[in-house]
Image (cartoon, grey):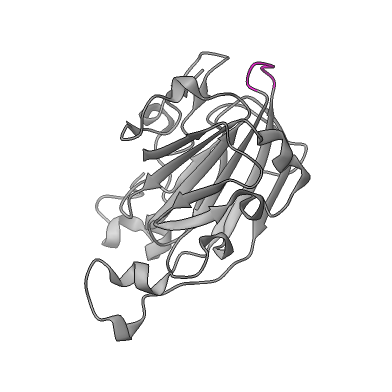
Amino acid sequence: MIPDLNAEHWGFTSFNDYFHRKIKPEARPVAADPNAVTAPGDATITRIDRNIGKKSVIPLKGQSYALADMFNHHPFGDRFVGGTAVHMMIPGTGYHRWHAPVDGVVRHAEVVPGEVFSVAETTGSGSDTQDFSLNSAAAVNTRGLIFIESIAPRIGMVCLMPIGVSEVSSITISAHEGQEVRKGDELGFFSYGGSTHFMATEGDGSEFGRPGRSVRANSNIAR
């Protein structure tokens, strides 16, 4: 939301104040289906992996993540063996707050500290410079882990993993362990930069459809 159209910089006090701005709730209505999994933010679904294994390797942002490393070896990670992993890309100019994809209880929430990867000056300019600079395993990037136990038995547990990429290493989680959340409740936000979401579900993910679909926060993306 723009604080004041007539003020200098529209009333935003800093770039990050603008970057992780909120939007009007009516702009992102929440899907009402109790068995629906909703999009945590505005993004494009770029990859869907079904029947994932504990040692699966998931390519994200051009890099490969070992699933156990992504979950920071948390015991809850075992619950997603045989489940579905969904990768969603967020544009740098997009909406950077994230919302609960299910009704349920937060069982664990943490920020896993990681590295900051900036583009090396020696690579010059061009679209391939970031990949050159990010040649380490992407599982070392700063990321959040939010495990939510859905109140719908058909859904089970969902893990939302906001991942900072490139120079993005500021992940703020507002949810806490034991908190009851409803679909659409805010869970946190990124500060400056384009970023990505990884979401894991226990189900087979047959209704996620195919990659390439653009979604909006709180819209129904699967049942």
* Coordinates of residue 18 in the picture (x, y in percent): 37, 56
- Look at the image and tell me in which quarter the N terminus lies: top left
176 relative to 170 in the view: left or right? right
199 relative to 104 in the view: left or right? left
The answer to whether residue 190 is above or below residue 33 is below
Q: Residue at x 65, y 59 (%)?
A: 112
150 relative to 35 in the view: left or right? right
125 relative to 55 in the view: left or right? left
* Range covered by the magenta-colored residues: 151-155
To which quarter of the image does residue 210 belong?
top left
Which of the two residues, 130 or 40, is positioned nearer the viewer here? Answer: 130
Secondary structure character of the magenta stretch overall: loop
> Residue 21 magenta-drawn?
no
* Coordinates of residue 223 in the picture (x, y in percent): 51, 17
> Residue 153 magenta-drawn?
yes
To which quarter of the image does residue 165 belong?
bottom left
* Coordinates of residue 111 in the picture (x, y in percent): 65, 57
The answer to whether residue 67 is above or below residue 128 is above
* Coordinates of residue 149 in the picture (x, y in percent): 70, 29
| Total marks in image | 0
Q: Residue at x 58, y 45 (%)?
A: 56
Q: Residue at x 55, y 71 (%)?
A: 115
Residue with the most extreme bottom position = 122
User: Does the rendering let one see residue 64?
Assistant: yes
Residue with the most extreme left position = 126
